């Protein structure tokens, strides 16, 4: 679209042209004694161009032809030279600033040639024609006006293209944000429900098994089910509260830059280990004290990796008896006495620190690789979102808790996530991507 595609701007330009043409011709008539006095026919001819600008610009060829014909009749009839030419020039400008750009240029410059021919013909038929230099000057000014109008059209087109590109980019950003938010919500809800329901299933199985033989133990299992389900509901409410944008109830309702998802600190890891135990499964949890300063967002990544890994053990390694879960900070250099450096030394060595989460079980690994499910996929997305990598697959050596050489083929599964401490540069990965690792166990899609 051009700047004059709408009728209102064209109407404004038409009024200006009508005033200039009529008033200017009245003055020019007094300055040209040999010119024919203005009458109603002359005024009607002067108003043809403004009307063509308003009504006929959508059909530019007709508008130009009518305007040039009207001014030709005006000049041949002997009326005053000069201001009458403003009408057709205005029509040429209107044509150039409206409609498809390429067609507008062709019609406008073709109309300029037609107008020049009409002026030359009228000058040849009238004895009081202006000097040749005056006619050439008028033609030059017409060319300048059309060049300026063309530049305005090009600039308008660039602005419109930039605005359209910005709208497309904004829409794409909005679609991406919506997709990311849906993925984040799905991941949070999946992690909460999968882990909690897995623990509830185990405890329910224990309760059913011991209902007749050991009522007290069955009652403990039912109590654990109630506790787990209550905690799961609280976590789901936390996630849904973020989705709904509800104000926080534990403090002032202000925008304090809180993350868009709930966060958990590493102090909740022992509870995860206790919930995962039962039915002959023992969970050994080791958390490096150096992780105490880990930001909440990264602590949430650690929490979810451990949670999902334990959930997969409960669901897919029914014969597992032991799980080793470790959260370490690599990159510290221990002193000779075996202690870690102080805060100042740790700060100086922060450039090479990596957080490592490893969860290993001794369960049976399936011989075939199933289709990837939401569990490992969600863990991988979380770890990669903080610049890390995740590897999941069968344990290459002895199963956890067994001595060297005691490993059994097809037993043992390990999940290992590594990501940099905030503000550090991750080291190049030597393990390869996790999706290249043959994972023998995964959550069902």
Image (cartoon, rainbow, N blue to C red):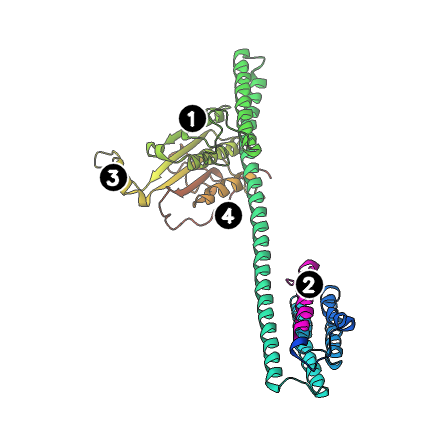
Q: In the rendered structure, are the residues bearing label 4 and label 1 in contact, judged by CB atoms less than 8 Å apart?
A: no
Q: Position of residue 116 (x, y in %)?
A: 67, 81
**Left/right of residue 367 with respect to residue 356 in the rendered view:** right
Q: Magenta stretch: dominant SS?
A: helix
Q: In the rendered structure, are the residues bearing label 4 and label 2 in contact, judged by CB atoms less than 8 Å apart?
A: no
Q: Which mark is residue 15?
A: 2
The question of residue 336 being in magenta is answered with no
Q: CA distance from mark 3 to mark 4?
A: 37 Å
Query: In front: 269, or 121?
Result: 121
Query: In front: 287, or 266?
Result: 266
Mark 3 — residue?
Answer: 345
Q: Earlier in the sequence, mark 3 or mark 1?
A: 1
Q: Secondary structure at mark 4?
A: helix
Q: Secondary structure at mark 3?
A: helix
Q: Which residues are magenta?
A: 1-28
Q: In the rendered structure, are the residues bearing label 2 and label 1 in contact, judged by CB atoms less than 8 Å apart?
A: no
Q: Earlier in the sequence, mark 4 or mark 2?
A: 2
Please identify the quadrant where the C terminus is shown.
Answer: top right
Q: Which mark is residue 435?
A: 4
Number of residues whose C-alpha sits closer than 10 Å to that of mark 3, classed few (under 14), some (14–19) or many (20 or more): few
Q: Earlier in the sequence, mark 2 or mark 1?
A: 2
Q: Position of residue 390 (x, y in %)?
A: 45, 43
The residue lying at 71 percent from left, 84 percent from top is 122
């Amino acid at each position: 679209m051009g700047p004059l595609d709408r009728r209102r701007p064209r109407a404004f330009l038409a009024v200006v042209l009508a005033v200039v043409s009529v008033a200017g011709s009245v003055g020019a008539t007094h300055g040209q004694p040999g010119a024919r006095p203005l009458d109603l026919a002359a005024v009607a001819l002067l108003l043809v161009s403004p009307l063509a600008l308003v009504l006929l610009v959508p059909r530019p060829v007709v508008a130009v032809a009518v305007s040039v014909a009207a001014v030709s009749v005006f000049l041949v009839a002997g009326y005053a030279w000069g201001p009458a030419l403003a009408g057709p020039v205005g029509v040429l400008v209107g044509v150039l600033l409206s409609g498809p750009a390429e067609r507008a240029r062709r019609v406008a410059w073709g109309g300029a040639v037609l107008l020049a021919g009409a002026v030359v013909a009228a000058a040849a038929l009238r004895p009081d024609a202006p000097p040749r230099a005056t006619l050439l000057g008028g033609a030059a000014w017409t060319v300048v006006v059309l060049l300026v109008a063309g530049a305005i059209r090009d600039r308008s087109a660039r602005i419109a293209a930039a605005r359209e590109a910005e709208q497309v980019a904004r829409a794409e950003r909005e679609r991406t944000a919506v997709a990311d938010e849906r993925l984040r919500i799905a991941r949070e809800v999946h992690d909460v429900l999968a882990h909690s329901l897995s623990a509830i299933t185990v405890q329910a199985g224990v309760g059913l098994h011991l209902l007749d033989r050991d009522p007290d133990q069955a009652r403990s299992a039912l109590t654990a089910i109630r506790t787990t389900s209550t905690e799961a509901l609280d976590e789901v409410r936390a996630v849904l509260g973020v989705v709904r944008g509800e104000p926080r109830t534990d403090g002032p309702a202000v925008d304090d830059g809180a993350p868009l998802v709930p966060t958990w600190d590493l102090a909740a890891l022992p509870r995860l280990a206790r919930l995962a135990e039962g039915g002959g499964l023992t969970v050994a949890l080791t958390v490096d004290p150096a992780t105490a300063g880990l930001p909440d967002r990264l602590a949430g990544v650690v929490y979810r990796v451990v949670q999902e890994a334990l959930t997969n053990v409960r669901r897919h390694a029914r014969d597992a008896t032991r799980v080793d879960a470790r959260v370490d900070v690599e990159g510290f250099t221990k002193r000779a006495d075996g202690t870690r450096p102080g805060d100042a030394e740790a700060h100086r060595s922060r450039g090479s620190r990596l957080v490592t989460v490893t969860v290993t079980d001794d369960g049976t690994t399936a011989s075939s690789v199933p289709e990837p499910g939401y569990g490992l996929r969600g863990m991988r997305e979380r770890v990669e979102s903080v610049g890390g990598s995740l590897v999941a697959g069968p344990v290459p050596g002895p199963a956890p808790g067994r001595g060297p050489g005691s490993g059994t083929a097809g037993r043992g599964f390990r999940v290992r996530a590594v990501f940099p401490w905030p503000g550090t540069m991750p080291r190049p990965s030597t393990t390869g991507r996790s999706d290249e690792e043959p994972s023998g166990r995964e959550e069902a899609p």
